[in-house]
Amino acid sequence: MIRKLLRSVREFKLNSILAPLFVSLEVVLEVLIPFFTARLIDEGIDRGDMRSVLTYGGILIAFCAVSLTFGALSGMNAAKASAGFGRNLRSDLFDSVERFSFSNIDKFSSSGIVTRLTTDVQNIQNSYQMIIRVAVRAPFMMIFSLVMAISTAPQLAWIYLTIVPILGIGLGLIMSRAHPIFKRLFKTYDKLNRTVQENLRGVRVVKAYVREDREREKFGEVSDSIYRDFSRAEKMIAVNAPLMQFCAYFCMLMVSWFGSRLIISSGGTEFSAGQLTSMITYSMQILMSLMMVSMIFIMIVISRASAERVAEVLDEKPDIVSPQNAVTEVPDGSVDFDSVTFAYSDRSEKPCLDNVDLHIRSGATVGIIGGTGSSKSTLVQLIPRLYDVVEGSVRVGGIDVKNYDLHVLRDSVAMVLQKNVLFKGTVRDNLRWGDENATDEEIERACRLAQAHDFIVAHPDGYDRMIEQGGTNVSGGQKQRICIARALLKRPKVLILDDSTSAVDTATDAKIRASFALDIPDVTKIIIAQRIASVEDADMIVVMDDGKIENIGTHEELLDKSPIYREVWETQKKGGTLGE
């Protein structure tokens, strides 16, 4: 896990090396300062030797200045390395998510991915900064200070040897008990993010159904859960401060007590006032080092759970990838389903698609009709290989979709999904998702085919009109037509409209279909619709029921041989939804 995360250091390796190097030099100088302070007191102040005072005083000033410089250089390099590492890790995490197939994304909630990209990466970044600086400084300081303290007064070394095990056991208990709580806590953060996202996305529904109180209650429940877990973890971690204070005061008292007795009993021959001063300073350095170690432990406890969650996403391998020696050209828009069976999960009791056989010639217009849950959308999602079949094969242009380069295949298959998504930006920016290099003439032509041009230019800003995130400032029908135009700009060989004219009136729907027949006759058009009027002129209509093809034929043929199709047609005819 650590090796995988450290791959994101990349161009910041030098900073990651310089930070601990400079901090090591800073520690060496800091440890030498008490040694020369003792010399200043014993050889200069006690003896009244001004020359020694000036000599050792000058050394101390120089050591302090250089130590301060090394500390500043270490801090700057550590900050740059950790910030760069966090940036790279966040980018690597996002790149991994972008490569996921739909089945991979289904394993992680969107709120969970957001938490990993924000809170978890920030925790890891903070830990990394502490590790390359504080985690080097603290052990070095403790070891060097212990060596100097023991060499200065070996008879007092037992004080440090007594206190270190106590601290080690205490920190180990805190870490082992707090980590499971933090691990659970970050999963609760996922739930909190999901609650907020759902509320913001569905705010119109919430207000329409006057469910604000219920939403507040849901948020409060999750927030209270985070409060309880965080309180428990913080209570355990809070033990760290009094433990450290106890150890610090214990060492100070013991060193002062036994050091003073040595000075008095030996008359200053075995142990001097300068040595006592340096021992007190070394005690503080050792204890401050242990305090820093405890802070590192706490940060590691918090970031360990985050690191596991981030590594979980980085370890996830895309289920769908381009094969070696992939086909890089789609010959035509023919589509063939050969004995296709598909299920979203291995645990599914029954497949979504069961032994489907369907053959569509290039340039044909195909309608797909079926009730809710009949797997119409699932069927077409197999064409651009958004999912892989469990059994059988799907061929585009006579070639199995598994043999294509994914970019080439998906560039040749344009889909307008049920849930149309527009991004924040101008209308023109959104349209250029289909072709980033499209000219204004090509954009206008696509919009005319999709019957979007007129309402776009009716706005004062025209194609430069700003679209809010999610397209909230345009109607459902306008959003659908912009998405259709965006798909047309890809110049696909296969165009799939997944119930993407449901918010468009029947007259406009008919104009769209007429323009398709006239202007893009060579493109295979697959239209999923609830209205029979949207597909009755198709070359072939597929009736689906419970994941199977119930019947195939033209409008007239299906009226004669398909009970499902005939029932839908008669219902819509009576309801007046076949046309206007």
Image (cartoon, rainbow, N blue to C red):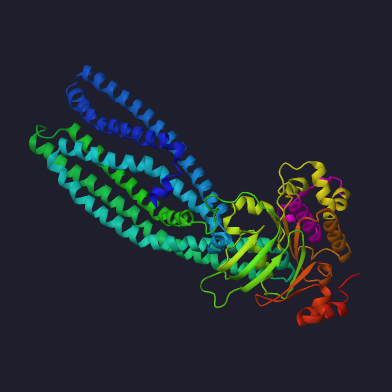
Q: Is residue 289 left or right of residue 460?
A: left
Q: Is residue 148 left or right of residue 194?
A: left
Q: Is residue 487 within the magenta segment?
A: yes
Q: Is residue 568 visible?
A: no
Residue name at image x 27 percent, y 30 percent? 33
Q: Is residue 344 visible?
A: yes
Residue name at image x 72 percent, y 67 percent? 205
Give the magenta part as a residue range: 459-488
> Relative to the observer, which residue lies in front, 30 or 92?
92
Position above or below: 343 against 13: below
Q: Look at the magenta stretch and give its main secondary structure.
A: helix
Residue name at image x 45 percent, y 54 percent? 311
* Residue 235 quadrant: bottom left
* Residue 474 quadrant: bottom right
Q: Is residue 346 left or right of residue 38?
A: right
Position above or below: 84 against 100: above
Q: Position of residue 182 (x, y in %)?
A: 43, 60
> Relative to the observer, which residue lies in front, 61 or 20?
20
Q: Position of residue 256 (x, y in %)?
A: 20, 42
Q: Position of residue 363 (x, y in %)?
A: 76, 59
Looking at the rendered image, the quarter that the C terminus falls into is bottom right
